[in-house]
Image: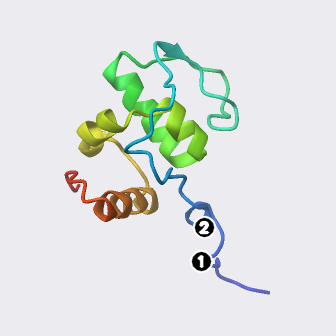
């Protein structure tokens, strides 16, 4: 029996969903008031988020970047707004690092926290 936690289990073992062409994709985007799908935000009760309100939009970005699929990122997150709000978004270290690596590979400058 193993007495310590393996580094291969837990939330940091999950891949971070980053669409390769997210910075150039022209996908349809969510707008207005949204309810996140249960696969992303499974806590009850269902909450609505107003993507026109900065606080709600940043919270949606936080949830989607941590829990969402590439399709979720494409639909709920706007690239330009993500770059502008990067310092304000609260993310686990492994998610922030994955995104910062992606930004760096594309020579996109975002503030470091």
In percent of the image, x 66 and y 21: which residue is there? 45
Rendered view: 39 above or below 48: below
Q: Residue furthest top?
A: 32
Q: Using the image, tell me which numbered label, if any, was put on residue 81.
A: none
Q: Of label 1 and label 2, which has the lower sequence position?
A: 1
Q: Quadrant of the N terminus?
A: bottom right
Whether residues under marks 1 and 2 lie with C-beta atoms below 8 angstroms apart, the answer is yes
Which residue is at the front of the view, 103 or 91? 103
In the rendered image, residue 31, in percent from the top left (x then y), is placed at 46, 17
Q: Total number of numbered labels? A: 2
73 sits to left or right of 6: left
Q: Residues within 10 Å of mark 2 (few under 14, many from 20)?
A: few
- Compared across the picture, whether 68 is left or right of 20 comes to right
* SS label for mark 2: helix
Q: How is the image coloured?
A: rainbow
For residue 7, which numbered disc appears in the image?
1
- Residue 107 is situated, as x and y percent measured from the top left of the image, at 24, 59
């Amino acid at each position: 029996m193993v007495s310590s936690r393996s580094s291969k289990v837990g939330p940091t073992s999950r891949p971070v969903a980053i669409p390769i062409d997210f910075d150039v994709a022209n996908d349809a985007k969510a707008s207005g008031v949204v309810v996140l799908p249960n696969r992303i935000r499974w806590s009850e009760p269902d909450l609505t988020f107003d993507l026109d309100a900065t606080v709600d939009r940043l919270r949606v970005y936080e949830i989607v970047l941590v829990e969402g699929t590439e399709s979720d990122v494409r639909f709920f997150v706007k690239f330009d707004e993500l770059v502008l709000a990067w310092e304000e978004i609260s993310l686990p270290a492994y998610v922030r690092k994955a995104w910062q690596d992606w930004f760096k590979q594309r020579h996109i400058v975002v503030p470091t926290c």
